[in-house]
């Protein structure tokens, strides 16, 4: 299927990879629901940009760690944009950069509520809408993982663990819903030029670039290109895959 009459939800769609994905999807003809939790100004700016260029987009506030708010997010999207065909599970948090022993239990719990349970809640609602047995037309889900799932995270242990869980979630769910016409894949970004990756000085940044075979950081747009490929019919026989977008790292 092409992007005609296709409806996409991007969680955490107001900044970074989520914003780049929302803009790229709109250019490809998707109607886009940009989910955000707090930054309504940026979300509505992106909506305005899409709509002013002839696309169709809405912004919907929801905390994806709340199953009730996720359910409402999907209801609003269907009412405003039509039947759902695609989901990008992008919203996530890294949590404090700290030793595990110094983290409060509530901080650890919150990371998993957003990064893992939030993905579960959104995928569950998407399957309800898209599955053939429920009258849907099938569709595609792309989960945003991280290279931290494979290499670990320096003083980001809960974050890295939550992303490793996403990789298994992607594979397991892909097998569960394949005959429902739903494909489930993940993109695993490396070090990307977003506000999630702050470097204390140029020397640290320079050394990080040396760890990457391509010698540079990735851009949100490059990750968005991979996401949109996985959503498209060009990847129609691809499911259960975790695609690294990391410059060879």
Image: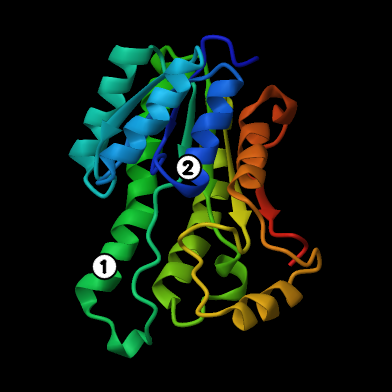
Is 183 drawn above or below residue 192 in the view shown?
above
Residue shown at the point (35%, 39%) measured from the top left: 42
Q: Position of residue 157 (x, y in %)?
A: 44, 77
- Give the residue number, with chain letter if any, for mark 1: 109
Q: Work out how far the residue at label 2 is from the one at label 1, CA to CA, in angstroms.
A: 23 Å
Q: Earlier in the sequence, mark 2 or mark 1?
A: 2
> Neighbour class for label 2 at 10 Å: few (<14), some, many (≥20)?
many
Residue 24, numbered circle:
none
Q: Judge left or right: residue 140 versus residue 41.
A: right
Secondary structure beneath disc 1? helix
Closer to the camera: disc 2 or disc 1?
2
Number of numbered tags placed on the structure image: 2
Q: Position of residue 84 (x, y in %)?
A: 43, 20
The answer to whether residue 182 of the structure is visible from this angle is: no
Residue shown at the point (49%, 61%) measured from the top left: 163
Is 202 drawn above or below residue 112 in the view shown?
below
63 and 56: which is toward the camera: 56
Q: Position of residue 189 (x, y in %)?
A: 61, 56
Q: Position of residue 206 (x, y in %)?
A: 68, 77
Residue shown at the point (50%, 12%) measured from the top left: 54
Is 55 drawn above or below residue 103 in the view shown?
above
Residue reaching furthest to the front: 202
The answer to whether residue 20 of the structure is visible from this angle is: yes
**Quadrant into which the C terminus falls:** bottom right
Residue 18, numbered circle:
2
């Amino acid at each position: 299927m092409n992007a005609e009459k296709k409806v996409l939800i991007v969680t955490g769609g107001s900044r970074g990879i989520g914003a780049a994905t929302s803009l790229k999807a709109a250019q490809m003809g998707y109607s886009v629901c940009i989910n955000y939790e707090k930054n309504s100004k940026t979300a509505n700016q992106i909506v305005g940009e899409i709509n002013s260029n002839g696309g169709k987009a809405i912004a919907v506030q929801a905390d994806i760690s709340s199953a009730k708010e996720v359910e409402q997010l999907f209801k609003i999207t269907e009412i405003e944009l039509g039947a759902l065909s695609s989901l990008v599970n992008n919203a996530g948090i890294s949590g404090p950069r700290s030793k595990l022993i110094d983290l409060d239990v509530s901080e650890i719990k919150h990371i998993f509520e957003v990064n893992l349970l939030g993905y579960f809640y959104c995928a569950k609602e998407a399957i309800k809408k898209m599955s053939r047995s429920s009258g849907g037309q099938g569709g595609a889900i792309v989960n945003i993982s991280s290279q931290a799932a494979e290499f670990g995270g320096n003083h980001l242990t809960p974050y890295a663990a939550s992303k490793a869980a996403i990789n298994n979630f992607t594979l397991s769910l892909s097998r569960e819903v394949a005959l429902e016409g739903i494909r489930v894949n993940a993109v695993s970004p490396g070090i990307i030029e977003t506000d999630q990756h702050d470097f204390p000085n140029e020397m640290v940044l320079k050394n990080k670039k040396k760890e990457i075979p391509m010698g540079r950081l990735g851009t949100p747009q490059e990750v968005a290109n991979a996401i949109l490929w996985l959503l498209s019919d060009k990847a129609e026989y691809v499911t259960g895959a975790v695609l690294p977008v990391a410059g060879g790292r």
